[in-house]
Image (cartoon, rainbow, N blue to C red):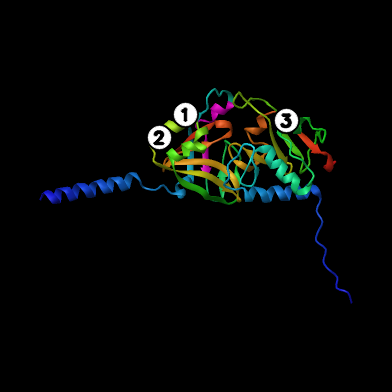
Amino acid sequence: MPEILPLAPTTTPREQLVDAANQASKDAAGKLYTPNGHTIAGFDCSGFVTYIYQKIFPHYLHLNTDAIESSALFRKVAFPQAGDLIFFPTGINPYDKKSYGNHVGIVLDGNTWIGSQTSTGVAKVKMLNPWWSSRTKFFLQYAMLA
Amino acid sequence: MRNFGWTVSLVTAAVLCACSAARLSTEQIYGSWRVAEVLCSGCAGPVLSLKGKLIEIGKEHVVNPVGDDCEGTLNSQFIKQINFRRALMGVGRTWPTAVREALAAKPKILYGFLTCNGVNYMQIALTSPDSAYYFEEDGVTLALARAK
């Protein structure tokens, strides 16, 4: 009687992205936002996206925020799903009337996204966060998730 | 007699020294804090209305009208005592001038991240049992005062 091996449950790339982001957020606890950082020792926002995406899509090449915004690998979507990107373009935040550069994070679910912010390093942010929800934003879907 | 006087002076000095250098405790981060001041050069708009808001930092729950609430376990393991002058050469370079000036007289502060469920949540500096700074996005800093 051949032994039947239990199969590991399969997960979708979107679920894997969420799992990877959650794990990285714990591994990066205590670490500051780091300009141009792309390791657990410190991330900037696009460095965090690259780190997570490369875990699931090894051929993903690093794109900075400007490159993400203009890349043909991403397309805007009206209704984001887990693993899509949330993108805050350069502009003035009505919350404090100051101008800010681009920022990018990864959607975890309908209520939360995750990214590396200057104030927190890698942290989860509610969609209704008073600071971030004041800024203009849109969502981007990676071609491999279409 | 003269020796006794010297001894008293030395003991008094030692006690004063010990008191002024008393270590702050991460336990003092917990409790109720009121936003005493919004430190933000050139800011306008709703952010200024954060002054007066109450932030409740509990060990299993944070009510935070400034950012997101935390439902879960708060941990202060990444909050450490740092030398302010050394901090100025690192992370403190980005702190507002008003914060740096206020901290200049504090030889030691507690600084770092509070985590919520193991993930970074608040970047905070405790400067005395009754005063702290909460560092928000892009240099905006909230001066916190213990709410009685």
| Magenta run includes residue B49 | yes
Q: Chain of mark 1?
A: B
| Magenta run includes residue A109 | no
Looking at the rendered structure, the kind of residue marked 1 is Thr
Residue A25 is left or right of residue A14, and the answer is left
Measured Cα–Cα span from mark 2 to mark 1: 10 Å
Q: Nearer the viewer, mark 2 or mark 3?
A: 3
Q: Is residue A8 above or below residue B66?
A: below
Picture residue at 55% right of the left edge, 31% below the top? B139
Say the numbered circle drawn on residue A66.
3
Which residue is identified by label 1?
B97
Circles 1, 3 touching at the beta carbon (< 8 Å): no
Q: Chain of mark 2?
A: B
Picture residue at 27% right of the left edge, 48% below the top? B14
**Which residues lie in the magenta part?**
B46-56
What percent of the width, then of the height, locates residue B111?
48, 43
Residue A135 appears in view: yes
Q: Is residue B61 above or below residue B99?
A: below
* Viewer-proximal residue among B96 and B75: B96
Measured Cα–Cα span from mark 1 to mark 3: 31 Å
Check the picture and name the quadrant holding the C terminus of chain B. top left
Q: Nearer the viewer, mark 1 or mark 3?
A: 3
Q: Secondary structure at mark 1?
A: helix
Which residue is identified by label 2?
B104
**Crowding near pointer 3: few (<14 within 10 Å), some, many (20+)?**
some
